[in-house]
Image: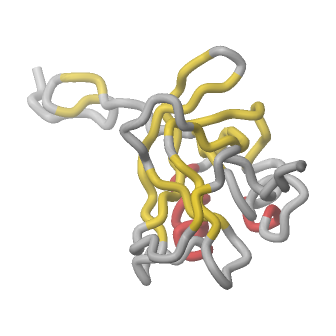
Amino acid sequence: MSKRKNSETMNGRAKPAPVSYLFVYGTLMQGQRLHHRLGNPGEIRFVAPAKIHGELYRLPARRYPAAIQSPRRDRFVHGELYRMRKPDRTLPALDRVEGCDEGLFERRLVDVWANGTKRRAWTYLFAQPLAKAQVVPTGRFPYQQAHA
């Protein structure tokens, strides 16, 4: 019997499947200015509206929001869940869009709730200080105006 490991195993155990879900909450959402950067419909498809535990911030003088994880379980960031056909191709392209090399955003795995189901998905969390940023109480982008 060969001791060589095949591509399906790692340390004698099944290799976990790569995470193929992506959660977006800002300018990559449908109808927003960078949505086309997600790729063509054959490579990525919309699954459902979704949310993650976290807080959304409005950045001064920026046209995009910033999300961070939050220990508060009553705070959510609302967005959209997508399924990527080839995450190994899609994610590096999105890393460039999100400024990961410059340390602007960081790609992280998070728990996402969509259609009553919890999944693991990649998202981009802000990796810079939030000085002068304002929390968005609704957790939604585009920002909703409070009604008087």
Determine whether 10 is above or below 137 in the image: above
Residue 89 appears in the picture as rendered: no
Which quadrant of the structure image shows residue 67? bottom right
Q: Give the residue drawn at x 55%, y 32%.
A: 112
Q: Looking at the picture, how far across and down is residue 100, in whole percent?
A: 46, 73
Q: Horizontal placement of 91 versus 36: left or right? A: left
Total number of numbered discs in the rendering: 0
Furthest toward the top, the residue is: 116
Which quadrant of the structure image shows residue 89? bottom right
Q: Give the residue drawn at x 67%, y 25%.
A: 114
Q: Give the residue drawn at x 85%, y 63%.
A: 32
Q: Looking at the picture, how far across and down is residue 136, in whole percent?
A: 65, 54
Q: Looking at the picture, how far across and down is residue 25, in whole percent?
A: 68, 52
Q: Give the residue drawn at x 61%, y 43%.
A: 77
Q: Looking at the picture, how far across and down is residue 27, in whole percent?
A: 74, 64
Q: How is the image coloured?
A: secondary structure
Q: Horizontal placement of 16 versus 51: left or right? A: left
Instruction: Depth check: give the residue in front, 99 or 146.
Output: 146
Determine whether 110 is above or below 106 in the image: above
Quadrant of the drawing holding the N terminus: top left
Furthest toward the front, the residue is: 148
Determine whether 120 is above or below 133 in the image: above
Q: Horizontal placement of 143 versus 5: left or right? A: right
Instruction: Depth check: give the residue in front, 68 or 137.
Output: 137
Determine whether 7 is above or below 39 in the image: above
Residue 62 appears in the picture as rendered: yes
